[in-house]
Image (cartoon, helix red, strand yellow):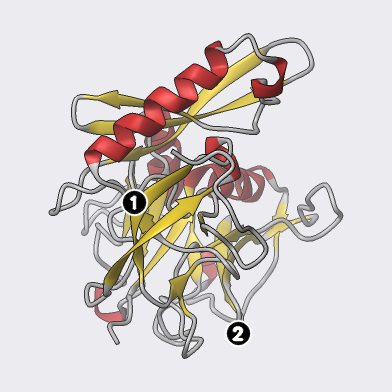
Amino acid sequence: MTMSTRLCFRLDEVLPVAEHAIASPTWRATSTHHHPADRGPALIWNPTDEQDLLTSNGLPDQHDDDGDLRAAPAWTWRHVPTGRRGRPHPGDADRFWPLNHHDPDSHSRPLIAQLREGAANGGHWLMVDADPRDLASPDRFLVLDHREQIAPPDTQWVHARVTAAAVWYATYPALVADGYSVRDGDVIARFALPTVRGMVADLRAIYRSEDRRNDPMPGETAALRLDGEVLTVSWSHDDGHTEQWTEIDRVYPDSDGHYAVGAYLWPWKPWPTPRQGGDRRGR
């Protein structure tokens, strides 16, 4: 089975952690520092048996709304039959990523500059090369507007029908990665262009409907739009006064012309599930 040497993070989860490190008055010392000049703001890669997390080394610590230490998780696949995950071996790379470090010899920009500029230019994903041979590469950190690989190259794809809350529980034909999952019980799915066009139309109809039963709350369903061959994915947020839509992903057709809509953004579930005997909202 092919193993990845890349870690993939959502930029909107990484940037707040990085900004905390930049704004902190002091920083936690770690055993991964190479020399005193590295004792500054940084992201710390914390691999565990279940996942890989990025945290700030800034003090005082940063906590989320639940009181837990704020962290940005790497989003990767899991091979359900074996339990293996698409992640580098924890010892394969340096776990200390300085945010302000600038190496004029490699022509690389500070990581915080890459994150900020990437977000300002429509980036959604941070890709980190964890191959130990490429730790000094200026391209080790890349901010992209889309996710390149959603499953290993040797994945077998099988036909299935799937549903998700993000598409108001409509069901669609898909190709799913056989034996792979992101979270327990979900599937990694790709969709043909006619199906994607159907999703776009279905969601547009839901938001235009005057039927109160088809009235999603802010942040409950996605909005999709085809811009040429690129699919933009947007999500809404209500601050108590107005509802605002924000682009959260872009999806490009793969070599087969399929689109990985919602991959690593929301869980697609197979339909029907063992407890669901019919297609109540199916197309």
> Callout 1: few (<14), some (14-19), or many (20+) C-alpha neighbours within 10 Å?
many
| 157 sits left or right of 39 in the view | left
Front residue of this view, candidates 181 and 65: 181
Quarter of the view holding residue 195 = top left
Residue depicted at 70% across the width and 48% down the height:
24
Tell me: residue 54, above or below residue 208: below
Q: Amino acid at mark 1?
A: Arg
Mark found first going from the N terminus, 1 or 2? 2
Residue 43: x %, y % from top left: 55, 60
SS of the residue under disc 2: loop
Q: Is residue 54 visible?
A: yes
SS of the residue under disc 1: loop
Q: Amino acid at mark 2?
A: Asp
The label on residue 147 is 1
The label on residue 9 is none
Tell me: residue 87, above or below residue 230: below
Residue hosting label 2 = 49
Front residue of this view, candidates 178 and 124: 178
Residue depicted at 39% across the width and 84% down the height:
92
Front residue of this view, candidates 83 and 48: 83
Could you tell me which quadrant the N terminus lies in? Answer: bottom left
Residue depicted at 40% across the width and 33% down the height:
199
Residue 146: x %, y % from top left: 33, 44
Could you tell me which quadrant the C terminus lies in? Answer: top left
Front residue of this view, candidates 135 and 68: 68
Please, which residue is most extreme toward the front here? 278
| 90 sits left or right of 209 in the view | left
Tell me: residue 106, above or below residue 219: below
Quarter of the view holding residue 189 = bottom left
> Callout 2: few (<14), some (14-19), or many (20+) C-alpha neighbours within 10 Å?
few
Instruction: Tell me the CA gap for discs 1 and 2.
Output: 24 Å
